[in-house]
Amino acid sequence: MKKLELCLSTDDNYAKYASTVICSANCNKSDDEELIFHILYSNLTDENIEKLASCGNVIFHKIDKAIFEPYFNNGVCKNVTIPTLYRLMLPSLLPNADRILYLDCDLIVLSSLWELFNVDLNEDQYAACVKDLGSNEHIKRMGFEFSGDDFYFNAGVCLFNLKKMRHENIQDKMFDYLKQNWQKLNYSDQDVLNAVLYRHVKRMDKKFNFITYNFYFSNDINPVIAHFAGVKPWKVGFYNVYREMFWKYFLMTPFKDDKSQNMMKNSVLFMHNRICQILWYIKMYPLFFLNKSRISDFMRIVRNSEINP
């Protein structure tokens, strides 16, 4: 049996999305794979812990968030929560793990993770990650020296070589960088990881951390992981081919009866249907605004009323 150790950081707000990640990974693993999920948290209700525990082989690690609070609220990282910083402690939190695959909670797994988890890392590499969008701009922002092969990675999916990180005290180096630079970090722990691990990361194909685009219709990438790093599938206004996949896995979780989430799901579906109708109408009648009847039909779509035959 192939054993894969994975890790997520969450809180009560994102527990239902963490369970969706776990469910999607379990649904798409091979029969000869055993997935072990490590959950890093500081605030989870007993109910949410019980629900997450029911999703599979889950181990919980409670973190004292006071360790990170002094370095968090710098006014820049407004869209990042404190639990994302917990991964900086992975080398010491998991002393018996040689490697760990870290996953953000805003993604879904669409096929086996073994190829990513088992990738070869040379003696100079601490991690395996996917190049981030706008990598060159990030490198310039961070003030790094740059050559053609250098890249800034997206930290939402990271395979960490914990054994090597422990051997070379990388955790201490990450905390030193955090303490010295926290006031100017645009992307919180992602900047810390990139700064300390720069030029010591194996670049992986984007299929292992495919950043979904809003209104991205093509499905020719065949990603292993679809990462909703921008607009989330549970928000009104989001649409691409992976949205329905997200809801498919969410409805398999112990949170499937969450009233607020289902209300949002129905609102998203309502807006999606209307937006698709509007786009379809514009495609079929690009000059509709020159015809009074076409304008009337278009406004009926906007108001979600029936179009006259």
Image (cartoon, rainbow, N blue to C red):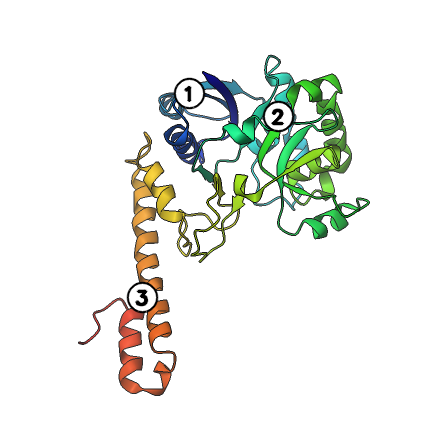
Q: Residues within 10 Å of mark 1 (few under 14, many from 20)?
A: few
Q: Earlier in the sequence, mark 1 or mark 2?
A: 1
Residue 213 or 202: which is nearer the viewer? 202
Left or right of residue 12: residue 202: right
Q: Which residue is mark 1?
A: 32
Residue annotated with mark 3:
277
Relative side of 214 to 179, left or right:
left
- Give whichever of 73, 290 is nearer the camera: 290
Mark 3 to mark 2: distance in Å? 49 Å
Instruction: From the viewer's perspective, tell me whether residue 91 is left or right of residue 156.
Output: right
**Residue 233: percent from left, percent from top:** 41, 48
The residue lying at 67 percent from left, 35 percent from top is: 202
Sequence-earlier tag: 3 or 1: 1
Front label number (1 vs 2): 1
- Residue 249 sits above or below residue 47 on the image: below
- Helix, strand or loop status at disc 2: helix
Q: Secondary structure at mark 1?
A: loop
Give the distance between the C-alpha atoms of the residues marked 1 and 2, in whole angstroms. Answer: 40 Å
